[in-house]
Amino acid sequence: MFKNLTDHIARFVSLSEDEQEIFVSYLKYKHLKKNGFLLEEGQVCHGNYFILKGCLRLYFVKDNGNKQIIQFAIENWWMTDYTSFEQKIPSGFFIQAIEETEVAYIESSSQYDLFDGVPKIERYFRLILQKYHSASLMRLQYIYDLTPEDRYRHFYGLFPQFVQRIPQYMLASYLGFTPEFLSKIRAKMI
């Protein structure tokens, strides 16, 4: 059931069979229906979620009631609210399934025991967080530096699989403009 995850880890660190067994013993599994929530605003985030199948979004609700999407995650990606997860404080975010989704997850209460039992897993998460941080910085740069049309082209070039799977109004929210503006950009590209 967790082969996607153990294969993903193998791209970054090499685990012995014993280390893999220990790691897998810490994993939990959850199935979400479309539009189901892993986290809602005000709750403490107790899991770090690896997407086995499906698609998630992380968002917050702005003062005007609009949902601002911060992150998407598909198969073989991780998603959590690290601030809430690590500091055990209420989250300001929602994590919701965009489609039927299956996740493997590690509970915050057992994460450090896992790291003590399999130190290579701590290294794996450090490498994943470094990649995530770099991607977040690039996204911020693109928001400030690229025109909306160039942001869409760039996103489409890097992640065509998202453009096919994610509703256009969600993609518009993530890219920082209205669905109507996204329609105009897409019409120009055809």
Image (cartoon, grey):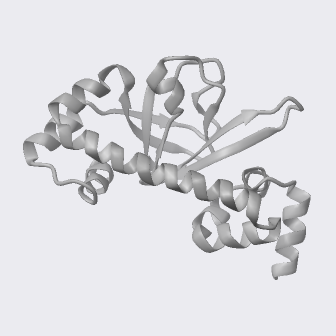
Report the residue at 73% width, 66% height from top.
151
Place of residue 103 in the rendered image (x, y in percent of width and height, measured from the top left): 43, 40
Report the residue at 39% width, 49% height from top.
128
Residue at the extreme bottom of the image, as rendered: 190
Closer to us: 172 or 102: 172
* 71 relative to 16 in the view: left or right: right
Closer to us: 153 or 168: 153
Corner quadrant of residue 166:
bottom right
Corner quadrant of residue 57:
top right
Report the residue at 60% width, 59% height from top.
138
143 up-or-down from 85: above or below: below
* 12 relative to 149 in the view: left or right: left
Q: Give the quadrant of the C terminus.
A: bottom right
Corner quadrant of residue 167:
bottom right
Report the residue at 47% width, 26% height from top.
85
* 139 relative to 112 in the view: left or right: right
Place of residue 74 in the rendered image (x, y in percent of width and height, measured from the top left): 51, 53
Q: Can residue 1 be seen in this view?
A: no
Place of residue 16 in the rendered image (x, y in percent of width and height, measured from the top left): 9, 48
Closer to us: 60 or 186: 60
173 up-or-down from 35: above or below: below
